[in-house]
Image (tube, rainbow, N blue to C red):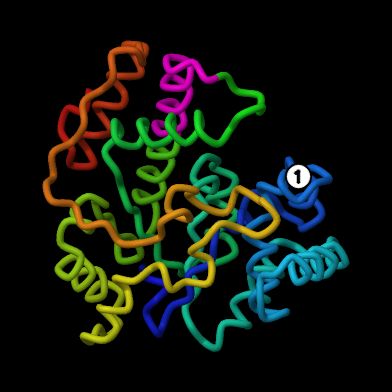
Amino acid sequence: MLGRHKSFYGFPELNLFLVDTIDELLNLGNGPTPYSSSYLTGLLRTIAELKFHGQTDGKIEEARKWITSRSHWTTKQMFDYLLDGIDGKTGIEKSPRTCLSQKSIDRALAGYPNARIIHITRHPVSTLNSLITSHQQYADGQSFGNDAAWLANFYIRLWIRSQELILSTFRRIDRLQAFRLRGENLLSQPDHYLARLFVWLGNSLDIQSLEAMKHPENSPYACPAPMGMIGDGDPHFHQSPYLRILSSLEYPRSMPDWRIDASLIAKANEIASILGYGKAF
């Protein structure tokens, strides 16, 4: 949504802050086939779009060769290159994996100490339901199992870890750099909450820009990646990349077959309360 505003550019998930060099990124869980390029997919799409002016199979292969020839670059050099290529717009980096590691967060802040951070939250039960469903639908043949209880306990640990790191980051940076927004509120009243967000950003928001942001499907990345590649965003969104207005703020209930460990529920409820959701489980 933000990437459709004339002053911003919304990248797909780039994963650049996970490691120090492009060589490391090239070897970070990326297999020899295009389908397995999960950590590299977003960068491939972005280079193909910005440098080679499209995302056909051929342009993706050109992008792969171009990136590989720059394996000696740092990931900061690569991100600086991308920022230089978006015509003075503000780049939006939104890789969820960044929030799973203190080193990744520190790497991002060291490279861009004045960056503004937007924390979009989602109710933990809704988050778990989405992650488990996506895993069972799209992760066939991969290393994790499809047992709902195992997946629920695995993903709640990831959610707790990411939220703890984000909360810790917010406590140590300038409060004017940070903005937290419940995603459910944004999707129930997008005009109101986008206006609030843009007051914080200090950018103008006219009627045309507001309308444009309600059409995320117009992003060049709002579709499945070429060549069957995965890993650059939510596959559900890519299949139907339209704004869905929430008609109510009722949150889902935990599923009985999840059987989440009591200590994890206690920690998740503690964080959910801080984020404004109250008792989640």
Q: Quadrant of the N terminus?
A: bottom left
Say left or right for 82 vs 24: left
Say which residue appears at 54% left-offset and 45% top-offset: 97
Q: Work out whether residue 133 or residue 89 is closer to the camera in this orientation and state it.
A: 133
Count neighbours of disc 1 (C-alpha within 10 A) and say few if under 14, some if 14 to 19, many if 20 or more: some
Magenta-span inclusion, residue 90: no
How far across and how far down the image is residue 6, in percent? 40, 85
Give the residue type at disc 1. Answer: Asn
Magenta-span inclusion, residue 159: yes
Say left or right for 189 vs 89: left
Residue at the limit of the structure toward the right, as seen here: 69
Disc 1: which residue: 30
Q: Quadrant of the C terminus?
A: top left
Say left or right for 58 vs 275: right
Specify start and end residues of the magenta stretch as a single range: 146-161
Q: Work out whether residue 249 or residue 262 is closer to the camera in this orientation and state it.
A: 249
Quarter of the view holding residue 101 = top right
How far across and how far down the image is residue 88, in percent? 52, 87
Say which residue appears at 44% left-offset and 48% top-offset: 236
How far across and how far down the image is residue 54, in percent? 66, 76
